[in-house]
Amino acid sequence: MRIDEARPYVVDKLKYALNPSSIAVVGASRYPTKVGNKVVSELLKWGYQGKIYPINPRADKVLGLKAYPTLRDIHEEIDLVFIAVPAHLVTAVVQDAVAVQAKVVTIATSAFKEIGREELQNNITQYLRDHQIPLIGPNLVGMGTPYAHFNCGFIPYLPVEGPVAMISQSGANLLAALGTSQMNHFGMSFFVGLGNKADVDFSEFIEYAQNDPHTKCLSIYIEGLDSPQAFIKSCQKVTKPIVVIKVGGSKIGNKAAFAHTASENPESDDYYDQVIKEAGAIRAQTWQEFLDISLALGYMPPLKGDHVVMVTNGGGAGLLSCDHFERCGMPLHELKEISPLLESRIRAYMPMFGSPLNPVDISGTASVIQYKGAFKQVLRDPNVDGLLGAICPTAVTDVNGVAEAAIEVYESCKDLHKPFIMICQGGQECHEAIMKLRDHGIPAYPTAEQAVNAMVALRKQAIK
Amino acid sequence: MSKKYLIGTEEQQAYMKDYNWNLKGYSYFEPGVVSTDHKFYSAFNVAKSFYQVYPEVFNLKYINEKTGLSTDEIKARIKKMYEKHEIMLVKNSCVGVLGFGLYYWIVKLKDNISSEDRQRIVDWMQNNDQICTGYVMDENSDFDFFNGNHMRTLDNLICGVLDKFRFDPCVDYVHICPVRRLVRESHVNQFDSLKDYRKYFWSEEQKKNILTFQNEMDAYDFAIIDAINNVETVADMFDYDVLAQLSGLNAQEMKEDFVYLVEQTKTVIPMVYFNYRAVGLKMHFFLVTMFDNTPTWRREQICDELAEMSEFENIFEFGDAHHHLILSAYEEITDIQRIKEKLLSYAEIGEIMEATSSRQLRRWTCRLDAENDLWEECIFTDDLLQDRARDKVLCSNCKEEK
């Protein structure tokens, strides 16, 4: 339901959704194949420390925890009510949630507005609004934060800790991001699936993220905006970078978005372009770009100028990068244009057949010492705004050693506030290097284009 | 008009009059078109989810008229009966028209197996989610299990369930008994009964004896169950205003949908199930095999004659099976000998196997094992897309996949 702007009571209460001290799971089944059981088991599995109250009138215990017939039987304070029962039961559960003065209600259940039950969804929403209890959902997958070991929903992964707040209207894509987080060390501060967003809207989670100390970048997946003005206002209040992917722009995608999360998109894609621009957010076109630039914006400061220097041991990665920088409207400058003295200094770290142009090709024989020296020279040069490093695993390349050198240089030059991004093209050793770099806060990617997109996004963030 | 194949005498053609049971599966919705969370089922689904806590989902006014008990007393009694696992609100679906076959199967274990082996197989049956219903028989019965499945194909039953245990050295045989007619279950006449559709049966003798046999439930408790199950129309079964209040759905629409579903389409029967185990009763089964030269119409005539007896809690008639009928009645409160004599009075009946069950494992996908804290946990056992023939089979001897 439409809002004009983020409601302060909602923003304030969202802390109970993402860091609750107690959760009641309504529909907590005894069977491991059922959603309600998964919610409880994932809370336990990932080490949630708060109180868990399974609600199941048929059971005495669920996963070893005492089960309660209804919310009213708990007689303790309940921060979050997570509802995973069929739609026709939700009204009564919500009435109980109001009666026990729960702080936040989350409805995972589907079969509301998206299948034509708009009146039922609206009645529930209005009832909760009347009692100032935020409702997240319905039709969502869940939410959580690795910082509280809190994985609430039917979600098999808790992401690794990191800077990105993932606010997604799609559960499936959220799950994809969470899986990526586990597998590719894409660090997150918190995540939430909004589903039909009957009550709590993007804008309120955006304002919550601004206050969240772990969040450095907001990544938002949108199928449709019910309250575009509220979205714009909240984004404009936020000082942290915001990345948006908006889907459902195609003719058939528009219909699919309604069937999925009841998103109505009468406006054109150009309209959303304008909304996102007015909000001051960066729009990604593809899912991969969305993740890549979110990671960079989460870890790195904005790129103050376009003096980016690339250091690589492989000419191919350099050429791919050059071309893509130009395609993105931010061509690389030659090193002598950026800093004539840097060109001469950096020669000390390459063989005579290396190239000090830009990309700086320190050659396939480059050692860890040469990489480290070149990285440091580049970052310390006051005319350089950002560094793009690349590792191509030749038979003599110590990939892990170079990654460790990059981390050491990055740590020592952090106070310069210059972006440092890495490309590691290759096999398993390169994947491991990417993980290591990401674990130390350096955005690292397996392809040149991904890294260039990330660097360009940092520039957009600086000039927005 | 369909073709008539008129071979044989008029007597042989008698089945055309009363006993022409059509193939199931094509007469109503195609498989998969209507699911059990369809709006037609809303009233039942709401009641099923709330009656444990809110007994007022039932039509207390109607029950009051039938029993004379106050509404508070009725609510308290329903709650008590639920909490003691004496009752459960359930439904039987006419699975045939929803696209499933209804297959029951008899299992005989070998004589003289150890009690550990027997228990192992009982536990396997209890915990196997692909088995939707079943009874375990007491030792020294003529057979040991009467289980059932609604399965999309016979292959799924064989590969998904039976092959996983029937080669166990403790198993003597398994006889598949596809249901031709589901006549009565849990005291309630079912979709294929000749008359008295949805009527709830207890004999006068049973009604009297049950009150002296046990102290858990009294005549009023049974009267409440009787009132709910014997409503003339399911419009009287629930308080639809209470259902609306709980669910936010429209009371009138729920009522009309449910009446249509149960009384017009006749694809589902709601009822309150009485759990005989909770009061210490045992179920006595008669597994009846008729001579092979008994024509189908005559088998069904016999089945219908027996269905006139209100003593039977269950009556299933099978087709394409070694056995033709299974009937059951409570051992302690029924004149079992009289029933047996009645069965023996039919010249067509060649063999009667008997068994006594103290424990029902599941009832139509719903677990009854309170001892495992799984009372009323409902598990759907098959779907329309599965091909269980591709499942790997775990050999019960070597524990390896075959």
Image: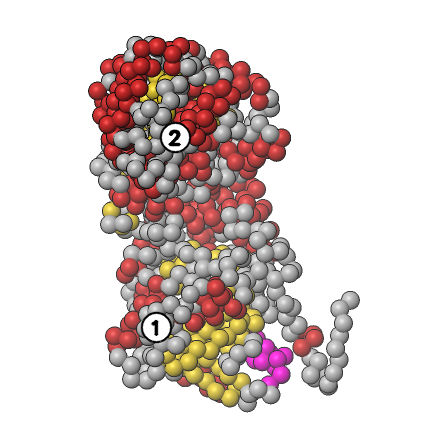
- Residue B173, quarter of the rendered image: bottom left
Q: Amino acid at mark 2?
A: Gly
Give the prevailing secondary structure in the magenta stretch: helix
Please tell me whether residue B51 belongs to the stretch shown in magenta. no
Quadrant where the image shows the N terminus of chain B: bottom right
- Quadrant position of the C terminus of chain B in the picture: bottom left
Residue segment shown in magenta = B294-305
Up the image or down, B322 lies above or below B40; here it is below
Camera-side residue of B371 and A205: A205
| The disc label shown at residue A405, or none | none
Q: Is residue A120 left or right of residue A106?
A: right
Residue A142 position (above or below residue A240): below
Coordinates of residue B103 in the picture (x, y in percent): 50, 69
Foreground mark, 1 or 2?
2
The residue shown at (53%, 85%) is B290
| Kind of residue at disc 1 | Ser
Residue furthest right in the image: B1
Name the chain letter of the residue that bears numbered label 1.
Answer: B
Measured from the top left, where is residue A378 in percent x and y? Answer: 30, 17
Q: Is residue A5 visible?
A: no
Tell me the residue that label 2 is attached to. A314
Numbered label attached to residue B396: 1
* Residue found 38% across the figure and 17% down from its top: A308
Residue at screen point 27% across, 26% down: A370
Q: Mark 2 falls on what kind of element?
A: loop
